[in-house]
Amino acid sequence: MTAFPVTLYSAALVLPVTAPPILDGAIAVRGERILHVGSRTWVEQSLEERGLPFTHVRWDGVLTPGLVNAHTHLQYTGMSEVGRGQYKGFEDWAKAFNPVYDEPHDWAADAKLGAEQMIGAGVTAAADIVTDPEAARALHDAGLAGITYWEVIDWTNDEWRTQGRAEVEAALDSLPTRPGTGLSPHAPYSLEIMPLLEIPDIVRERGSRIHIHLGESGIEREFDHDRNEPWQNLELGSLLELRQAGFGTSATEYVDHLGVLGPDCHIAHGVYMSESDRAILRARGTTVALCPRSNEVIGLDAPPVAAYLREGSPIAVGTDSLSSSPSLDPMADVASLFRIARNQGYSHDDLAERLLRAATLGGAHAMGIDEGVGRTGYLAVGTNADLAFFDVPVTDVTETLTTLAESGEGRAAATVTAGRVRYATAAFTATTGVQEDHR
């Protein structure tokens, strides 16, 4: 067996996520995996005691797990003109999106560019929703971890029975098996009831994942109504029919009844979520990927960040696509979530650390890639060597993490995926001597 060389990466502050932050910390990497995590002196001593020669790479900023973008559509990277607008709600945004989407696009090239932009922001894993098959290889070809989700949208019950299920199963089976696959039923209002009932079975038969937009449109929120009889016993074909019948049931309760939610499912946005809706998500072990900058562009309310934090709801961070967001840098969304949480009254000192956890382990957990071989989202022995280095001055732990959370956008200095340096700034290269690995 060929022995892989060992690299010791040390930093002024290391954030393992599943262990306390370490001032003057280090990790040792051999091949694609992490070998040791701890203080720099201890890791050095451990390697020397094992007789393992190593190359030492020193960074005076912050070292974290690679970021996880828990909700995006990389194929829309070429539609940034839409994302630069400002809209009055989801329907208004869709009017701008649809004609640009219908123009000719090189979806494969756009998705590739989006993956490169994410790597440059410190991202090593993503939940990428694919609508056109040309974009399906973006994560695979970029060597990123995560899940490629085939989007399922606009199927009626009758069309689903005659051809929809077969088409969707074929599309799912055609996706690259690495890094992982799943289905994304677009939203409760864009699919009738049969596809929403059967998609969970299709996915679970294959051991795949589910990712759905939920609580992004005002139509999905619960509202007062006069009908109190159980709607589940009625022969209703869609959420629209439920509304027309006079029921104010939330979309979250609706999809929960259909079996969509669960620990193998995570949702995007979660803006219009009542206390009972959030309780359903917690009960099902379903993570919400918060995308506050996208919500702002579209003209939605801010998500209830403080409530999610206080209630212990599992959260992750997503950028959405450039068709509704200024960039594919999750640290910009972390900064937005930080401001929203403070404005909503969350005053605890753990805010920065919790949001950084959401942007790493939270996203990995949402996709089920925080366990097993190839696990990622945190720094521990045996995890993938997926790393992000940030050009942030290090003082004490609390102040440094707050600085990173509030102003980490655009400050990724290097990105390592599975032990390979995939991105490095000139400052990182000048300081460490390490350049990008172009193999």
Image (cartoon, rainbow, N blue to C red):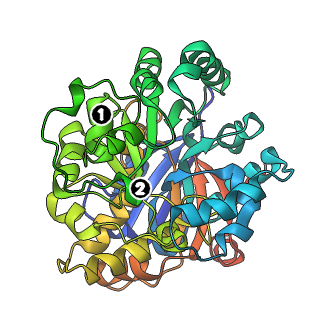
Indicate which disc, 2 or 1, sits on the residue closer to the N terminus: 1
Q: Is residue 435 left or right of residue 145?
A: right
Q: Residue at x 57, y 73 (%)?
A: 87
Real-space CA distance between mark 2 and mark 1, rounded to the nearest whole angstrom: 20 Å
Above-or-below relation of 304 to 376: below
At mark 2, the secondary structure is helix
Above-or-below relation of 369 to 103: above
Q: Residue furthest left?
A: 228
Q: Residue at x 23, y 37 (%)?
A: 284
Above-or-below relation of 14 to 366: below
Residue 15 visible in the current orientation: no
Dot label at residue 319: none
Q: Quadrant of residue 320?
A: bottom right
Dot label at residue 262: 1
Quadrant containing the N terminus is top right
Mark 2 = which residue? 360
